[in-house]
Amino acid sequence: MNFASDNVYGVHPAIMQAMADANSGTQSSYGSDEFTARAERQLCDIFEREVDVYLVLTGTAANSLCLSAMVPPYGGVVCHSEAHIMVDECGAPELFTGGAKLIGIPDPAGKLTTVSITRVLDGFIRGEHDPKPKAVSITQATELGTVYNLDEIRAIADLAHGRGLRLHMDGARFTNALVSLGCTPAEMTWKAGVDALSFGCTKNGAMMLEAVIFFGRSLSEDFIHRRMRSAQLLSKGRYLGAQMNAYLDNDLWLDNARHANAIAAYLAGKLEMTGKVSLPLPAQANEVFPIMPRGLYEHLQAAGAVFHEWPGEGPGTEGLIEGNMFVRFVCSYMTTKDQCDALVAEVEKWNGRA
Amino acid sequence: MNFASDNVYGVHPAIMQAMADANSGTQSSYGSDEFTARAERQLCDIFEREVDVYLVLTGTAANSLCLSAMVPPYGGVVCHSEAHIMVDECGAPELFTGGAKLIGIPDPAGKLTTVSITRVLDGFIRGEHDPKPKAVSITQATELGTVYNLDEIRAIADLAHGRGLRLHMDGARFTNALVSLGCTPAEMTWKAGVDALSFGCTKNGAMMLEAVIFFGRSLSEDFIHRRMRSAQLLSKGRYLGAQMNAYLDNDLWLDNARHANAIAAYLAGKLEMTGKVSLPLPAQANEVFPIMPRGLYEHLQAAGAVFHEWPGEGPGTEGLIEGNMFVRFVCSYMTTKDQCDALVAEVEKWNGRA
Amino acid sequence: MNFASDNVYGVHPAIMQAMADANSGTQSSYGSDEFTARAERQLCDIFEREVDVYLVLTGTAANSLCLSAMVPPYGGVVCHSEAHIMVDECGAPELFTGGAKLIGIPDPAGKLTTVSITRVLDGFIRGEHDPKPKAVSITQATELGTVYNLDEIRAIADLAHGRGLRLHMDGARFTNALVSLGCTPAEMTWKAGVDALSFGCTKNGAMMLEAVIFFGRSLSEDFIHRRMRSAQLLSKGRYLGAQMNAYLDNDLWLDNARHANAIAAYLAGKLEMTGKVSLPLPAQANEVFPIMPRGLYEHLQAAGAVFHEWPGEGPGTEGLIEGNMFVRFVCSYMTTKDQCDALVAEVEKWNGRA
Amino acid sequence: MNFASDNVYGVHPAIMQAMADANSGTQSSYGSDEFTARAERQLCDIFEREVDVYLVLTGTAANSLCLSAMVPPYGGVVCHSEAHIMVDECGAPELFTGGAKLIGIPDPAGKLTTVSITRVLDGFIRGEHDPKPKAVSITQATELGTVYNLDEIRAIADLAHGRGLRLHMDGARFTNALVSLGCTPAEMTWKAGVDALSFGCTKNGAMMLEAVIFFGRSLSEDFIHRRMRSAQLLSKGRYLGAQMNAYLDNDLWLDNARHANAIAAYLAGKLEMTGKVSLPLPAQANEVFPIMPRGLYEHLQAAGAVFHEWPGEGPGTEGLIEGNMFVRFVCSYMTTKDQCDALVAEVEKWNGRA
């Protein structure tokens, strides 16, 4: 019953096998290997155009490197106030960009809107005393398990571009959002106006694999130097390439995400039916965020369920009734219905009240 | 006949197996897994004391993170003018330290000496107009395949400490130097005065695994934040821990290095006997640096040998006779005598002259 | 009728004269001159202890340099969400600290409190994924013309120190606050627990003069290097020293601030009596922040009054009635009653309504 | 007899008077004053074209800000190994550029040449493992009191531009070089291919005044933000503008430099005639660099002459005969023939020998 995060689970066997298969013979180092070359072609195919692909090792690196190519050191990045880049990366975006300012916008559904972005941008009236906003960053799926639809992305992109800003997408759970929308990767990114993407694979079954993807060359100029100086260029690059090969082969990435999303929806439904928790947000990807009594939380923890209180806010959580908690359950590509059933059984078993 | 680098070879099967074995079940993420915990204990055992260990993903990260904990942004790092931190990391040390200055000292044998360090430090007479030297960084084994002996390390450490500087060791080829000297890890590091170590495993058979090791707590204060903000904290940390477990188990690390060193010595001897190349430096670790005629270089490349011209200097290379080249052959834990014999046979076959 | 800022006025004649008087003969450069030496002694006298003093050229430099000595690059600085370091320095604190995170706390009176600071610090539960809060910065007088009393400062200092944080005071309007409280410089700083101070002189009659002052040596270690590398060490340092000499001689600094505060109080009283504006905050220093109808604002601007809408929030400004504005009037050491009377006369003349 | 530096002397009376004259009334702050506006027009006139001008407070700031607009954080700057940016600014260029690498080229005459630059650029063969050279910086007049002629500047500019690099000129002693060459400011800068200039005024009679000047708009995009975040935007900007007005009015800048150069030539001639020192370099600007016996050095110091040993190298100084020293005499706009005569008399008085 481990719902703590997608990253407490291991690597998909097909990916592990591909890494083992890549282990024979010599390969040019630093990303000049044949596996990486194939990964780059695969991603061009998937995105239906030439894309500039740079494999890196962590999601924080992917985000921070994307932003470093998008904003100058005196720039600003508009993002959600609970975005991963804002609250989970210990200032990595500031380091990689040379000190750019993150401008957080609170929103209970975890989303930016053209209204909230416009309000923030209109507040930059101090000229050179202000940093200069140069990018908007959205997280897809959001930190709260919701998903921007294509119209929302397009509207934000249009607003950003109209004001001279670029649009970054933190796709740590890109595929979960993709299968949730049922659209193509192209539709969810460059066709909707996204300029740069952190394409996350680790949470969805890879070992340590993220890709920085630029749609258009201007952002990727000299990017190999940026990756190198941030210590994200792997000498034995074949093991990143091989992961990506297997991740994309045979729709593994899509299948993994579909499974995780389906399980999350199943869990959300079951939890709601118990009547003991409330779900202020729809489970559109692979995460479920219930509000539950502290007594139930403690009961579940004692029963061995692993999950965490969520430190951010959601709809209706600001004035949480005394004794209630806002918590997060994450379903991975390996999470099973049995695990959900076991959890729900424990919820049912609890006799306390909200 | 691939002698381009240690990193063109794959991962040792025992390490690959350990990663596969670590793949079942859930593990706490971000380095709180049981494999990483075991790796930390192993390293304490090997170094015969409590050490603070931080697993990271690349050698550049290990070096740059070590330095970031050792020198302030206005500080200086004394190193060899051809050190990896100076010429191969695209400014990563500058990024991670916030702009500290690397002060390169040329030396044909690839080594710093107390004499050359003293001369450089004595040149810092401009007070606040100068950066403030705060660390010395030595590479063990050196970039030129030579090895500092224990007295040399101790002398440099004493000089550094006497002047208020710390001593960093870039141990990208730590184990090759260790087995070359036949001493203990403790003797080659903290007992000789080393304050922080980049403990490299990737070149010696791991997939992507380096460790930052601090001897003494003062340098490691808050270091978890430094690692995180430089995007070197792996979410599925078990795969770093498992690599280290297998790397250290059953003396695999030592055996790998002994093999690589022995092969390099074998190759050096065979090459010298051909009379067609000269070896200005002893092959004390796993690298051989001959001076050879360009015609021979081209013959070997055409014959399929993979190796590179070395852009730095060595003894006698400054005034290279017209048409001669300074080249590098790297032997890895997988390089075989047969490969060396094939190479030497091609050297013999060449009829040109220097 | 220029109330735009304290810095639209010139330099006090006594300070200008001192600069001219310092112009003869040679002086050692880079702050080793006799004027600077005297300034340092003066400041030790005024603060009733040894203090480490570093003269710099702008308030942004003073703040950013203070913070760079107080927090590491992975650190966090708790401040008001409208603090000068947060919204007026274009990321200078981020540049000078190497990327530390500013954590803004909104408060309608412009002040931090132990309650609001505690709430924010308690939210740092993500361990290494969070920056590590290392300093609190308060502005005295505040951005909204209010003043922390000694108990408030002491309480914040105790809280900060108890949690391992340092306390910085942005004293751009230090003297205005000082004479408002009627206490000694020592009481308002180190005796209340302040660790580092940006001692502002420019707004109060100097030309370009701010001092970084550390109470205790640990923060000032190597600070001369920090000042130099941020390009704040003046070669002809005598002209900073001479400014400070004259600023502190004959109580000029205190007289200037007393005048500015008195004029602000006078203006506030007069404005309030018109019944056409409201004053949500007391004018405790040299600034007055009325809420006024847009019609009145436009009338005054047309009449030649120079002042600005305030982009931040104050008490009661969040839900400003349609058509009202929150504006700022700054009184300087040169502002006269006549100017205030002229302004008030224009307010009286206006026939519109709120 | 103070020849320590140009900055031990004060401010030219005409400049001091202009500052005093600017002291009445109110002026818009932050460089929006009328004095600064006039300074910008003056500089456009002098350079015979539209130039983007940004007044700043120190030469280190001017240089570092120029470079920050010319090279990315992963970039490299080719400069002389003894350039001010390399050895006198405590890493300010690294701070302001976000970590770019300075690549120093030794040369006994203090000059870069197309040969030495080409050799260095050709050594960047490591691809992304190298920083990417993006600018060349030359100092005019050089650190050794020599001057690049127009052909030399043009040749370096052509080389730089042909390889995609920009050309920066550190003009801390711009006017001394200008009057030495007898050309126009336009000829010595943009007509010869210079892209950005640090236009120094402080050493030549101003109080604290340098200008960043861009020839062409692409480099100055958003530069106001760069200046602000590096704390170089003065609130009472009129005092920079007024300095520049007086500096350029009535050829004051040219007269000051002509005087300083003439005095230096006079001193050089007189010193040489004593037969007790040698002058390995021509005194082309306002500095004289003799080689003298240590005994003479000590005699002069004892006699009250103020000047310093020069820590860098010059022609013939590498193998200085035991007991000889390489020293620097700087002549300022205020230095008199009498001072020179007094110094030379002391040289004559000395009975020792080289």
Image (tube, coloured by chain):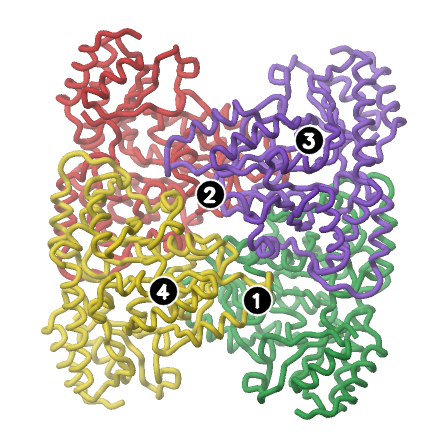
Chain colours: A yellow, B red, C green, D purple
* Residue D165 picture location, percent across and down: 50, 37
- Name which quarter of the figure residue D30 lies in: bottom right
User: Which label belongs to residue D141?
Assistant: 3
Q: Nearer the viewer, residue D215 or B228?
A: D215
The label nearer to you, 2 versus 1, is 1
* Residue C103 picture location, percent across and down: 49, 67
Disc 1 is attached to a residue of which chain?
C
What type is the residue that disc 2 sits on? Glu
Please give the name of the residue rendered at 55% of the width and 57% of the height, measured from the top-left corner: C70
Disc 3 is attached to a residue of which chain?
D
D207 left or right of A165 in image: right
Residue C271 shows up from this direction:
yes
D281 left or right of C154 in image: right
Disc 2 is attached to a residue of which chain?
B
Q: Residues within 10 Å of mark 4 (few under 14, many from 20)?
A: many
- Cα gap from disc 4 to disc 3, whole angstroms: 51 Å
Is B192 drawn above or below residue A139 in the view shown?
A: above
Disc 4 is attached to a residue of which chain?
A
Q: Is mark 4 in CB contact (under 8 Å) with mark 3?
A: no
Circle 3 SS class = loop
What type is the residue that disc 3 sits on? Ala
Residue tagged 4: A84
- Cα gap from disc 1 to disc 3, whole angstroms: 40 Å
Residues flagged by tags 4 and 2 on a common chain: no
- Location of the N terminus of chain A by quadrant is bottom left
Residues flagged by tags 1 and 3 on a common chain: no
- Cα gap from disc 3 to disc 2, whole angstroms: 30 Å
Q: Is mark 4 in CB contact (under 8 Å) with mark 1?
A: no
Residue tagged 2: B94
Residue tagged 1: C87
What type is the residue that disc 1 sits on? Val
The label nearer to you, 1 versus 3, is 3
